[in-house]
Image (cartoon, coloured by chain):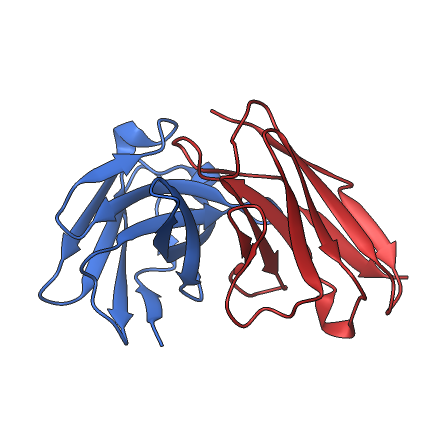
């Protein structure tokens, strides 16, 4: 059974960088796309971006200028950095695995438990 | 971005009821539509992928249908553990986008 676990600070100061890591256990990080998704309090989820195990990435245009996702296959981990954060970046941040279907469709079939990140001074 | 609109936003129902939730995409997404269930304080859980395929381990009272722009999630006979918020999500084109959610409450 694949298990994902987010880790990182729960409080970030405005204008600083939010950094989170997702550790994958129970399976290899190879051969899948791995995403970060966030959910502001009381709102629906928002996809941030993904990384393939090879290192290729794609990001939501709404966040692209501030986001970097990286992968460390030797540790079965992938990471998220969001710079220049504001209170609007306060959310529960999830990491998730994407599984493909019909060749180009995908769904998020495994999720971490989520970690609340608050941006405040 | 493709906008996903769910209706209703909230719904009250009783155990044993048949319930249908609708999701409409702002443009065609063929069958690249997924449904998730989220309970308070928990991560979303995949129920249905590719519009109508039941994820492994999900009870058969959940079903999905639709194609193009209009989709439905049906729960044939509500159980106490089904009261939650449900989200649709499209994977036809990036960025992946989710609906605003439908909160299913006990009547």
Q: Quadrant of residue A112?
A: bottom left
Q: Residue at x 72, y 72 (%)?
A: B81
Query: Which shade is chain B?
Result: red
> Residue, x 41% and y 30% (percent of image)?
B93
Q: Quadrant of residue B39?
A: bottom right
- A66 or B77, nearer to the observer: B77
Q: Is residue B79 something one can see in this rendering?
A: yes
User: Vertically, is A113 above or below B5?
Assistant: below
Vertical comparison of B20 with A58: above or below: below
Numbered-mark total = 0
Residue A121 seen in the figure: no
Residue drawn at the location 21% of the way across and 48% of the way down: A52
Q: Residue A50 occupies which quadrant of the picture?
A: top left
Image x and y of residue B63, in percent: 67, 56
Foreground of the two, A112 or A106: A106
Q: Position of residue B53 (x, y in %)?
A: 54, 55
Chain for colour blue = A
Give the residue furthest to the left: A74
What is the quadrant of the N terminus of chain A in the image? bottom left
Image position of B31 (left or right of A35): right
Q: Position of residue A7 (x, y in %)?
A: 31, 65
């Amino acid at each position: 059974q694949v298990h994902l676990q987010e880790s990182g600070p729960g409080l970030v100061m405005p204008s600083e960088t939010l950094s989170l890591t997702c550790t994958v256990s129970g399976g290899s990080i190879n051969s899948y796309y791995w995403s970060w998704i966030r959910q502001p309090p009381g709102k629906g989820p928002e996809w941030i971006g993904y990384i393939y195990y090879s290192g290729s990435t794609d990001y939501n245009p709404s966040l692209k200028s501030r986001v970097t996702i990286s992968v460390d296959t030797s540790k079965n981990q992938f990471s998220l950095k969001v710079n220049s954060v504001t209170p609007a970046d306060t959310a529960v941040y999830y990491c998730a695995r994407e599984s493909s279907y019909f060749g180009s469709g995908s769904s998020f079939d495994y999720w971490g438990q989520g970690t609340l990140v608050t941006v405040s001074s | 971005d493709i906008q996903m609109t769910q209706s209703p936003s909230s719904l009250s129902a009783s155990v044993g009821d048949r319930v249908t939730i609708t999701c409409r995409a702002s443009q065609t997404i063929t069958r690249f539509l997924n449904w998730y269930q989220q309970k308070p304080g928990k991560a979303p859980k995949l129920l249905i992928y590719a519009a109508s395929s039941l994820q492994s381990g999900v009870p058969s009272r959940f079903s999905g249908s639709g194609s193009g722009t209009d989709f439905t999630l049906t729960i044939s006979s509500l159980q106490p553990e089904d009261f939650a918020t449900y989200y649709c999500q499209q994977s036809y084109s990036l960025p992946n986008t989710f609906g605003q959610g439908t909160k299913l409450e006990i009547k």
